[in-house]
């Protein structure tokens, strides 16, 4: 495209020079031949620089780090929402455990069973259910349940959803 424009400009320049110098035949027979000046062609080198492509900086927001707050096992409640069969009817309940530093715990769910002794605990109805910590660091509850404490989650790998820490139990 640029070369074509340069060629057109040079052609116009040469024709214009010839017209001005009088070298055109105007139909007069008495005209004397005139020496045609030789046009000097000047080659000009124009450096072509490419326009740099703008650099787009992509800024990513830092991924928020989830802070797991380790709650004391015996401070508060461990609750979850689950569907239990109460009688013969499936019922959505809030199920909770509360553990005490003396190695005992209470269990309940709402609606249905206020906090107290778990049905899975044996013995005297007035005796409290107990728990212990096994060599693997898991909490073993009387009645056969085993939980793993990790941050805000109390996990029974065989029975999801898992329990999460709560400052309130059931009412």
Image (cartoon, rainbow, N blue to C red):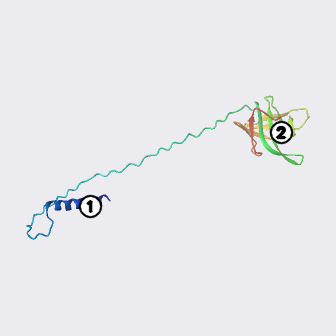
- Image quadrant assignment for residue 144: top right
Q: Is residue 112 left or right of residue 139?
A: right
The image's mark for residue 122 is none
Quarter occupied by the N terminus: bottom left
Q: Is residue 97 left or right of residue 151?
A: right
The image's mark for residue 8 is 1
N-terminal of the pair, mark 1 or mark 2, is 1
**99 and 55: which is toward the camera:** 55
| Rendered residue at 25%/59% (across/down) | 9
Q: Residues within 10 Å of mark 1 (few under 14, many from 20)?
A: few
Q: Position of residue 80 (x, y in %)?
A: 77, 40
Residue identified by numbered label 2: 109
| Rendered residue at 17%/62% (across/down) | 19
Position of residue 3 relative to residue 92, above or below, is: below
Position of residue 153 relative to residue 21, above or below, is: above
**151 and 34: which is toward the camera:** 34
Q: Is residue 3 left or right of residue 17?
A: right
- Image quadrant assignment for residue 96: top right
Residue extending farthest to the top is 102
- Image quadrant assignment for residue 64: top right
| Rendered residue at 20%/60% (across/down) | 16
Q: Residues within 10 Å of mark 2 (few under 14, many from 20)?
A: many
Spatial separation of the CA atoms under disc 1 and disc 2: 93 Å
Position of residue 153 relative to residue 75, above or below, is: below
Q: Position of residue 167 (x, y in %)?
A: 75, 32
Given this view, does label 1 or label 2 mark the residue nearer the observer? Answer: 1
* Secondary structure found at label 2: strand
Q: Do residues under tags 1 and 2 come within 8 Å of each other at their CB atoms?
A: no
């Amino acid at each position: 495209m640029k070369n074509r424009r340069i060629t057109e400009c040079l052609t116009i320049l040469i024709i214009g020079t010839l017209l001005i110098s009088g070298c055109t035949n105007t139909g007069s027979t008495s005209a004397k031949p005139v020496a045609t000046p030789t046009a000097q062609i000047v080659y000009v080198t124009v450096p072509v620089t490419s326009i740099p492509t703008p650099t787009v900086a992509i800024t990513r927001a830092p991924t928020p780090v989830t802070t797991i707050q380790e709650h004391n096992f015996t401070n508060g409640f461990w609750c979850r929402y689950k569907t239990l069969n109460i009688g013969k009817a499936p019922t959505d309940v809030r199920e909770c455990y509360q553990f005490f530093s003396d190695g005992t715990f209470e269990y309940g769910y709402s609606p249905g069973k206020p906090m107290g002794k778990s049905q899975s605990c044996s013995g005297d109805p007035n005796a409290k259910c107990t728990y212990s910590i096994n060599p693997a660091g898991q909490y073993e509850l009387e009645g056969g349940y085993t939980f793993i404490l990790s941050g805000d989650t109390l996990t029974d790998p065989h029975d999801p959803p898992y329990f999460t820490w709560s400052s309130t139990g059931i009412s």
